[in-house]
Amino acid sequence: MPVPPPENPPFAAATNDLRVRRATVDDLAAVVELENASFAVERMSARQLRRHLDSASALIMVATAQRRLLGAAVLFLRSRSRVGRLYSIAVAAGARGRGIGEALLQAVERAAAKRGCDRLRLEVRVDNAGAQRLYERHGYHRFGLRRGYYEDGHDALRYEKPLA
């Protein structure tokens, strides 16, 4: 009888060769799986994610190590706007706390600045203290609240950061 893989695989060694890059169609299945595992509501479908892979107004970044997808971030860019919108960052459960979210955030910031954005905005659930700490550590400041923002009725805090 085969032994099932551990629920939270040990990613410690795998994060030593972490690489953050733009997602390709070959990453789609793993990104969809991560999306479904990470978010109870507000999930993007495979169709939406596939469309964003080739879009001029979106960018999906992935963090990989040893050919394993450990995290993903989705950035939206509007033409004629200097404000980018970080839609989401997701990190595999067993890889959290290893700097992957931070690496994705920094890559998204660089990509937004390269595309001409001078600010990055995002929304985060009021009950997601870990994400709030990450953003605040990286210079994001709260500037608003959106009541009932999420499909399940939860509120969202709005954050913004000026980009160099």
Image (cartoon, grey):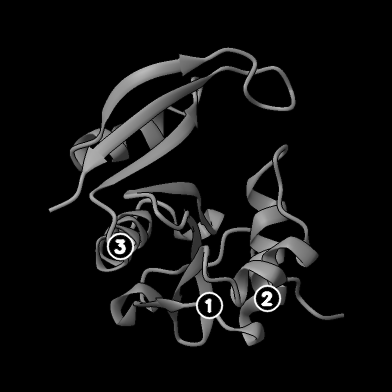
> Which residue is at 30% across, 34% downward?
160
The N terminus sits in image quarter: bottom right
> Which residue is at 30% across, 62% downward?
103
Q: Position of residue 114 (x, y in %)?
A: 26, 68
Q: Secondary structure at mark 2?
A: helix
Q: In the current view of this chain or complex, which residue is farthest to the front?
A: 80
Instruction: Identify the mark at residue 23; answer none if there is no mark.
Output: 1
In the rendered structure, the answer to whether residue 51 lies left or right of residue 135 reads right
> Which residue is at 39% across, 34% downward?
130
Instruction: Identify the mark at residue 131; answer none if there is no mark.
Output: none
Determine whether label 1 and label 2 are within 8 Å by CB: yes
User: Considering only vertical position in the picture, is 60 above or below 131?
Assistant: below
Q: Position of residue 121 (x, y in %)?
A: 37, 39
**Three-letter residue code for mark 1:** Ala
Q: Which residue is mark 3?
A: 103
The crowding category of the residue bearing disc 2, from other C-alpha atoms within 10 Å (few below 14, some 14 to 19, many at least 20), is some
Q: Position of residue 65 (x, y in %)?
A: 42, 80
Q: Which residue is mark 2?
A: 28
The crowding category of the residue bearing disc 1, from other C-alpha atoms within 10 Å (few below 14, some 14 to 19, many at least 20), is many
* Dot 3 or dot 2, earlier in sequence: 2
Comparing 91 with 27, the one in front is 27
* Residue 44 visible in the current orientation: yes
The crowding category of the residue bearing disc 3, from other C-alpha atoms within 10 Å (few below 14, some 14 to 19, many at least 20), is some
Q: Secondary structure at mark 1?
A: loop
* Residue 5 visible in the current orientation: no
Q: Secondary structure at mark 3?
A: helix
